[in-house]
Image (tube, rainbow, N blue to C red):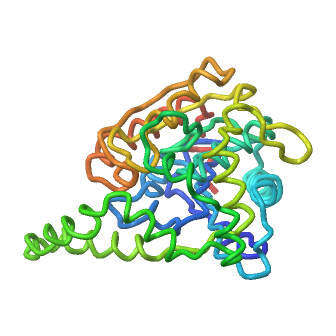
Amino acid sequence: MIYEENKLELHYYEPAEKRHETPICLVYALVNRPYILDLQPDRSVIGQLLDAGFEVYLIDWGEPSRLDTTLGLEDYVCRYLDNCVSVITDRSTVDSVHLLGYCMGGSLALMYTARFQQQVRTLSLMATPVVFDDTGGLLERWAQFYDPEVVAETYGNVPAELLAAQFAMMEPVENLLTKYVQFFEKLDDEAFVEMFARMERWTWDGVDVAGQAFTEFVDDVYRNNDLIAGEITLCGECVDPADVDVPLLQIVGQYDHIVPPASSEVLNDVVASEDERLITFSAGHIGISVSERAHEQLWPEVCRWLAQRDVFVPEESTET
């Protein structure tokens, strides 16, 4: 850990051989814990980026206390994320970072890029919710009847257990029956059992979400589609995805039931950048980060895309 602020921790991962000038800043969701990006050696997004020669920084938002219920999106984007980027650029002596956001973290990274574009070299988004009109997702249906303010007023911070149960009920048969049947059928497969145990631990190892941030995200992003419309105001200015003019890479899961592809794909047509790419990968919401096929096919391609938009560091310049 190289920096902390309130509950936030910024972690640094050093590559064995630095081959690229610009570091990568991983922005995870406020829900769950970010170690899904480093689940085990052969299923590690962080490991892939390090092997490609990038310095990697990971933001762990931590778990809000009762004192943090009023933290809103502006706090996370304009204060916490901006402070982390400043620490990274100062420490690595660069002017900008590669931002890589996952799920809700991708939405925060998009907001940040629209507001502080000069600090961002490229923007990469994984399974990122951007729009929710007729996308076919269950969360879109829930948002029509779900009152986040009542939840926040009741609990203060939205409990991790409540969120985990809601996500599990999006595919109840798979999450509460099928996967456990599969587990017992493969008890003799040690590698499968180890991976299953790690995934189960992560799935139920959630964190509470600050009530204000939760309310704003559900209302502004899910219910009102204010993000794609450029109508969210942060730091006194509207953040408009149409203003984003940095290279954009979007990774969507073809079978993502949490953030359907249609929730993300429209962004590529909205941004100002002409350097934009969409990768639709045959996986679900979590599979794009932990599946064996993703690490064989997807992440080497992501690393190549980032490398092509960076400055190569000659070997002799890394010697001490």
Figure quadrant of residue 98: top right
The count of marks equals: 0
Q: Residue at x 50, y 30 (%)?
A: 265
Q: Residue at x 73, y 39 (%)?
A: 113
Figure quadrant of residue 300: top left
Q: Is residue 280 left or right of residue 225?
A: left
The image position of residue 242, as x and y in percent, is 71, 25
Check the image and name the residue furthest to the top: 274
Q: Residue at x 62, y 28 (%)?
A: 247
Check the image and name the residue furthest to the right: 236
The image position of residue 158, as x and y in percent, is 62, 72
The vertical placement of 77 against 242, above or below, is below
Q: Nearer the viewer, residue 27 or 155?
A: 155
Classify the position of the C terminus by image quarter.
bottom right
Q: Is residue 195 left or right of residue 39?
A: left
Figure quadrant of residue 121: top right
Q: Is residue 179 left or right of residue 104?
A: left
Q: Residue at x 39, y 55 (%)?
A: 286
Classify the position of the N terminus by image quarter.
bottom right
The vertical placement of 267 against 167, above or below, is above
Q: Is residue 178 left or right of residue 22?
A: left
Check the image and name the residue furthest to the bottom: 66
The image position of residue 139, as x and y in percent, is 49, 51
The image position of residue 65, as x and y in percent, is 72, 81
